[in-house]
Amino acid sequence: MNDTLPNESEAFRYFLDICEQTAYKYGVKPIFVPILEETALFKRSVGESSDIVGKEMYRFTDKGENDVCMRPEGTAGVVRAFVQAKLDRAGGRHAWYYWGPMFRYERPQKGRLRQFHQFGVEIFGEADITEDVNAICMIADIFDVLEIKFSVKINSLGCNECSPSYRQKLVAFLENIKHELCEDCHRRIITNPLRTLDCKVEKCKAHLVSAPKITDNLCLSCENDFTKLQKLLQLKNIPFEVDKNLVRGLDYYNKTAFEFTADTGGSQNAVAGGGRYDKLVEFLDGKPTPAVGFAIGIERVLPLINVAEEKRDGLYLCTTIESELETIFLRGLELRKHFVTHISYDTKQIKNHLKNADRSNALLFVCIGDEENENGEVWIKNLRTKEESKIPQGELEQYLARILN
Ligand code: HAM
């Protein structure tokens, strides 16, 4: 669990600004949901057989004997809120975004944290596959602004029509090679056979190469949708590749599943993931409502962002005269109503004041020394251009407004 100190928090803030501006252009509105939810919510949505629920939940019983956990992801809570607000019955399209901490008790390593942050979007009410392209384009737009190079893997997981017969085919195949598979895969054959396709154990991977693939077993409607999805992505010039083994680690997806990777040189380079989940609203006791969404892993994106060079702003106000300290302090508080103002509380030597002003990232150094005090002036140095000037004290506000606003 990381601290985010100011050297990173600026990039964090900048990233969120870009996400929020992009979401706004796509007509997506903010939603805030609790971090703590009933454990049952995640069991029902993310799925008991998933690693996230089975192994990684921060789960406890509260003082009221409720079985709760810190959310491992955002979709389930947003769907719960959607149903609880009865928007499933209102109909229409509802597009929401959120950001905040998620918790997974994973083995920590580079790019994998136990508390991490996501920016996520969930769109309810549109069954057309064009909405999936819309979601993918939103992430692409965000990464383009941030100048992050990415590629997208897509797959179709089928629907209620085609996935049960595919599942049967896959289980039959897995039973035949069971003796070659790892313990986890033995369990997966029963709980969620699709997940075997995602196994990271080399021996399993080798044997699963010849497993039947869902994309070769889609019903006509899913196949048409998957073709349309690819055509639209091509037209939008989004670089993608079909990954027939992409199953994602959460149980609620149907049809489209996608993952964005960035060339980070590390293994944890999945920077965003998402897909369609048309059955989840109904599964969480709402009226059947198609939905699609995604989440971006903020900590995985931050190292890829080039934050603009240090930005100087505001002023550093100081004096070298003991008797002027109080006046300077009160004047500084007034100036703060309009400008970023750093106030020095003591009378250092000029060179120490200048050093502090530089550290504070102020643009203007504003000082009243003996000479300026006698002449009713202030001494100003622009710390970017190094230009110096003296102006009457009474004209300070106007001067600052001209330079800083
Ligand atoms: P997810 O793939 O589990 O999907 O997570 C989305 C992103 O969160 C990942 O691509 C990764 O960048 C980041 N992430 C996941 N785990 C960690 C970790 N331990 N440390 C750092 N970053 C991590 C979801 O969570 C779905 N709720 C996405 C979604 C929304 N699908 C539909 N709507």
Image (tube, rainbow, N blue to C red):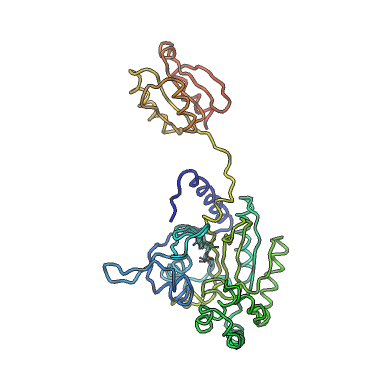
Q: Is residue 212 left or right of residue 47?
A: right
Q: Position of residue 116 (x, y in %)?
A: 47, 58
Q: Nearer the viewer, residue 227 or 28?
A: 227
Q: In the figure, 148 relative to 261: above or below?
A: above
The picture quadrant where one finds residue 85 is bottom left
Camera sees residue 62: yes
Q: Position of residue 173 (x, y in %)?
A: 62, 86
Q: In the figure, 3 relative to 381: above or below?
A: below
Q: Is residue 360 left or right of residue 293?
A: left
Q: Is residue 364 left or right of residue 306?
A: left
Q: Position of residue 404 (x, y in %)?
A: 52, 31
The picture quadrant where one finds residue 1 is bottom left
Q: Nearer the viewer, residue 38 or 204?
A: 204
Residue depicted at 52% across the width and 80% down the height:
188
The picture quadrant where one finds residue 274 is bottom right
Q: Is residue 162 left or right of residue 327?
A: right
In this view, which residue lies farthest toward the left?
63
Q: Position of residue 347 (x, y in %)?
A: 37, 21
